[in-house]
Image (tube, rainbow, N blue to C red):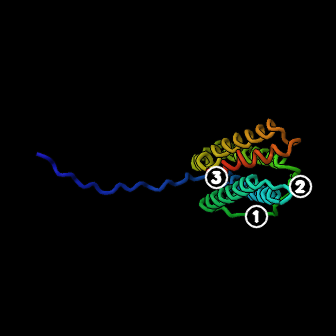
Amino acid sequence: MEQPEMEHPEMVQPEMEQPEMEPRYLAESNAAINSQIQLQLYAAYIYLSMAFFCNQDEVALVNFALYFLCQSQKWMESTEKLFHFLIQRNGSLILGRIADQDHRHDWCDGLMAMECALHLEKTLNQSLLQLYQLANSKGDACFCSFLKHHFLQQQVEIIKEMGGYVTNLRQLGAPGNRLAEHFFDRLTLGESTKEN
């Protein structure tokens, strides 16, 4: 004899509340988040500048331009996530002027732009790791999880990708060989941008 299935009341999961954080740490972490937001906005700005440089008629690296434009958009989206996280913590956004930070905006070629992009990603990664260390040192598991899930693994992947691109460009003969950049643009980045 089969027993009828019993209906179970829906199990309601309690909202994951953040543990009470000391005000000094909360202020310090919110200031660090604001600094990270500022750095990410700067990255989006630089990538946009790189995209327009590569799209100029005399440079004509269309897929470099698309790649850098995609990176700009990714950093804008990531910045929005960080902003929403800040708001959830009752923090306030403090925007400043987008600083120049001594990066060149007059790249000579695609290789130079890609090397600058790689350096920029390493800078962003270092800043994210410092944020993670701050959160981890205070036992802020929610913030650590957020950073791991939305930022840290993606940074490892993009740094590896860009490092490979720089290596490939050099092996093809860039910067001395202008055709190397155009082949790389069409064959490597052209395929990459199709996938994205």
Q: Which residue is mark 3?
A: 194
Q: In the image, what residue occupies the spot 76% across and 56% down?
A: 62
Q: Which residue is mark 2?
A: 106
State the image coordinates of residue 144 (x, y, percent, origin top left).
Answer: 61, 46
Identified by mark 2, the residue type is Asp
Q: Secondary structure at mark 3?
A: helix
Q: What separation in Å lies between label 2 and label 1 (alpha carbons)?
A: 26 Å
Identified by mark 3, the residue type is Lys
Q: From the viewer's side, name the closer residue of 66 and 17.
A: 66
Q: Is residue 104 left or right of residue 17?
A: right
Q: Which residue is mark 1?
A: 95
Q: What separation in Å lies between label 3 and label 2 (alpha carbons)?
A: 27 Å
**Crowd rating for badge 2 (residues with CA inside 10 Å; few <14, some 14–19, many 20+):** few
Q: Which is closer to the viewer, label 2 or label 1?
A: 2
Q: Earlier in the sequence, mark 2 or mark 1?
A: 1
Q: Is the residue 164 above or below the residue 21 in the image?
A: above
State the image coordinates of residue 175 (x, y, percent, origin top left).
Answer: 86, 42
**Crowd rating for badge 1 (residues with CA inside 10 Å; few <14, some 14–19, many 20+):** few
**Quarter of the view holding residue 95:** bottom right
Q: Which is closer to the viewer, label 3 or label 2?
A: 3
Q: In the image, what residue occupies the spot 58% across and 46% down?
A: 141
Identified by mark 1, the residue type is Leu
